[in-house]
Image: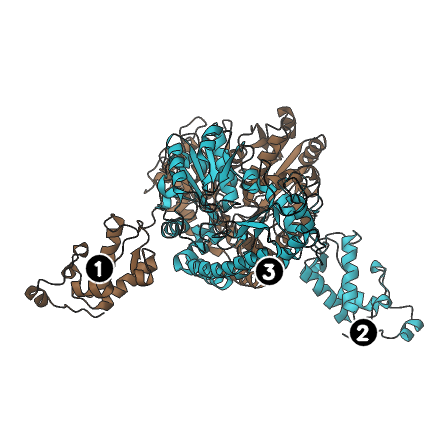
Chain colours: A brown, B cyan
Amino acid sequence: MNRSIGSPLDRSISPGGASDFLQLDAGDAPRGGLSDWLARRIRSAIADGRLAVGSRLPATRTLAADLRVSRGVVTEAYRRLTEDGHVAGRGRGGTVVVAVPHAPIRPSPLPGRDGGASPEGLFTTPPDLGVFDAIRSAPARIDLSPGLPDLAAFPRAAWLRAERSVLAGLSPADFGYGDPRGTPALRRAVAHWLSRNRGIPADPDDVMIVNGTAQALRMLVDVLRADGITDVAVEEPGSLGVRQHLRPLGTPPVPVDAHGIRVDALRATGAPAVLLTPAHQFPTGVVLGGERRRELMDWARDGGLVIEDDYDAEHRYDRPAVPALRALLPEHVCYAGSVSKLLAPALRLGWLLAPPAYRDALVDAKRLIDLGSPALPQLVLAHLMESGDLERHLRLIRRHHRRRRDAMIGAIREHLPGAVVHGAAAGLHLMITFGTEARGGPYGVLPDAELATAALAHGVKVHPLSWHTQRPQPPGLVLGYAATGTAEIAEGVGVVGRLVRGEGPSV
Amino acid sequence: MNRSIGSPLDRSISPGGASDFLQLDAGDAPRGGLSDWLARRIRSAIADGRLAVGSRLPATRTLAADLRVSRGVVTEAYRRLTEDGHVAGRGRGGTVVVAVPHAPIRPSPLPGRDGGASPEGLFTTPPDLGVFDAIRSAPARIDLSPGLPDLAAFPRAAWLRAERSVLAGLSPADFGYGDPRGTPALRRAVAHWLSRNRGIPADPDDVMIVNGTAQALRMLVDVLRADGITDVAVEEPGSLGVRQHLRPLGTPPVPVDAHGIRVDALRATGAPAVLLTPAHQFPTGVVLGGERRRELMDWARDGGLVIEDDYDAEHRYDRPAVPALRALLPEHVCYAGSVSKLLAPALRLGWLLAPPAYRDALVDAKRLIDLGSPALPQLVLAHLMESGDLERHLRLIRRHHRRRRDAMIGAIREHLPGAVVHGAAAGLHLMITFGTEARGGPYGVLPDAELATAALAHGVKVHPLSWHTQRPQPPGLVLGYAATGTAEIAEGVGVVGRLVRGEGPSV
């Protein structure tokens, strides 16, 4: 860059290089960075209000003369400000301030939890709707929260390839408002996927595309409430997030034992509907047994509605696939699935297969919520499903997940020998409960909320089992392994082990 | 393709070419299409249940021998079925049926409107939630429905370029669950955009990303109801779709005159909130005048909540930009905008800037609805906004829109000389009302619902003004021009003109 006034000597013999405009003095600029300096000074003048939006910057020739710098210096500074979106060239109107610059992106506090995402009280106060955002934004070295697949393996190249192909094939009308139930291509691809991978005979007309299981639950809540339903029974233990999304419906808890939900206890609640995770119960990992399935189907035939959250059915390691309840009794089972655990939660894409009686009302619910899901990601996903790319991806991450699961089991054996491991044959997480040899707490161990708090304070995120229970239960932890490398898994479980033994984590 | 048994003579001297498997007889196949025929027969056997999912197909060698065709014929048929996703090779397990084939995609009937999307009664029965899907899927040569920009100009190349750049820059955590308010990059880009293009000083923390204005309204309905609000006043005439999305709130109508909404009449309703389209009133195109703005701001300072639907503010032709109400009184104005009219409704992306008092509750509402909008399209949009690509696109489509608007005005002058044109200085549509020289109807003209019905029967989609009114109003039409070529615009308006004059459309 050409600098007209170069040396200290020049400045000493001249009072020049200064301008009325913002009282700029080019003598303040660091060597060789005049444009940078000028852009920075203007930017901060915009930020603190000295230069208002709409005000015009001096002409480059004028400012360059005032500052005794080359005109190229000023032009370059204006170019950078224009690129940033802070100023804009207006032809004969000159260069005008158009936007106030903002501080660099910072994790701004989220509402909920007393207005901030501070980890204080995260596990020891009753969890509110913001609790998952709070744990997500809490700083930690190692994240063993459950619910994520291997995100580093996201098939970026295949996604981009599919997107190119989709964009090339669209008609103008495809960019307009679409069928609120989803694009025909994805509804067909999902029907194929569910036939192929989950044994569910599905017609595309049975499939509604939604923005993830959370949205499916929200739509069901709207429809069930309008139908006079006030309670949906849930598994105990069972997902905190699911219970939150069923609000304002009541969620009577029904115990889960080694064979899954106790259908006799479900009957006893009198609830007209139940939400289940039959393929891999959350958080215990139990598979709903054959006898229980039959009992449940009898309950459904008597008028009960089953909501099947098939959240991680595609992830299994040491056992055969578990058929979906939807395949047995489609008229009584509302089936929800998503790509959150197949690809990425950030896609916010899922599907809902409803009993015929609820279909029209669910389409209206979807219309009111957003008029339909975004079309492009739907079409890209359809492409990945039909091309085999998604199955290839699933095989790849299954290998990663299995290795990470094995690493976690090994680390638990080493660092938490008194812990009992549950649900390891499938899924993306383990549940552990503690034997009585551990210290303190009502069940002979540290209360799990305190354990999770201590772990977070030492840089490790875990879910206390008590988050996922409505009634007092023996303490435990829910540990995700799928999104974390094996070394971090070992380190994280090591920290938990030392905390359980009452040792400092650095020991 | 090699066909082992070729001629009628071969068959006549041999009972062969038949198989136990599905009672196939290669003699039934058309000449030269053996693989096709075989694949089709197997497909239909899967469809009608003769071949169940899980059942194994005969080995290629065996079936070829039975049918007396070359093995290549069978291999090719199996390959096609595999590509379709109906069968899958299982190594030593052979080739297995994995999915029931579906009928080719057909426009399946949407719920609502008596279960079908038939145009019967579309305009003459009270419009339900499915009415826009019904008109969208009704067959027609020319679509003059309002609300769409030029969709053929969607910047596919820029979108794909931005997507490539976004995918390359993401960290694994970006594929996980995100901030329910939207990605920081898009919230910042929207803040810049609104500062630059709408004169709204906005901080990224003020911005929530939503799936279009429809979702913003739905979130507001949830939050306002929880706040005890039961009514939101709306403009009269005013958007039918907006009124539908405010359900179950009451929507007392407030008359719009040449200066916009009558604030005295708004006060008289006693409603604590009002939804407005101040920059280009829908459907009249009126701009909210300066005096009315002052009255409205007084009303808001007295405790009223203004919901500003800035639905097409970026599209103007013959007039200066109209400042947003949000820029004047951010504590009392909830501002909603979207890319539906800048880029494409299929993206389902928009933004909501709420008064501080409602912010936390709106974040909770968004969490319950879908936990946040999909991340990838948000990041691509942010890229387009910050790179200047979106502004370039806007300049391009503005030129197209202006040309189409002029074509529509010309066609109206020619074919509908008695019609009064409203709101032509901006937007994506015109409103026309009829003078008294036209025939029939309570206002001296054909009732507009009948006119729209007749137009649709003759292949032209228009909105009757009566859709967008709650009280009896003089008849009119709302005509979109932005998404339609000039020749079709002229033809469509010509059809309407002949119908108004009582002539057959082919005259």
Q: Disc 3 or 1, which lies upstream in sequence?
A: 1
| Circle on res. B343 | none
Q: Residue B72, position in %: x, y?
A: 75, 71
Secondary structure of the residue carrying numbered label 3: loop
Secondary structure at badge 2 equals: loop
| Numbered mark located on residue A171 in the image | 3
- Quadrant location of the C terminus of chain A in the rendered image: top left
Out of B57 and B164, give the one closest to the viewer: B164
Characterize the local packing of mark 2: few (<14), some (14-19) or many (20 or more) Cα atoms within 10 angstroms: some
User: From mark 3 to mark 2, how far is it between C-alphas?
Assistant: 41 Å
The quadrant of the image that shows the N terminus of chain A is: bottom left
Q: CA distance from mark 3 to mark 1?
A: 49 Å
Chain letter of the residue beneath label 1 in the structure image = A
Image quadrant of residue A77?
bottom left
Element under label 1? helix
Which amino acid is tagged 1?
A: Trp
Q: Position of residue A184 (x, y in %)?
A: 64, 53
Residue B162 drawn above or below residue B251: below
The percent coordinates of residue B171 (x first, y second) are 42, 54
Q: Which residue is mark 1?
A: A37
State the mark number for residue B3: 2
Marks 1 and 2, how far apart in space?
80 Å
- Residue A442's image quarter? top left
Residue A32's place in the image compared with A394, above or below, is below
- The residue under the point 68% across, 58% down is B85
Q: Are marks 3 and 1 on the same chain?
A: yes
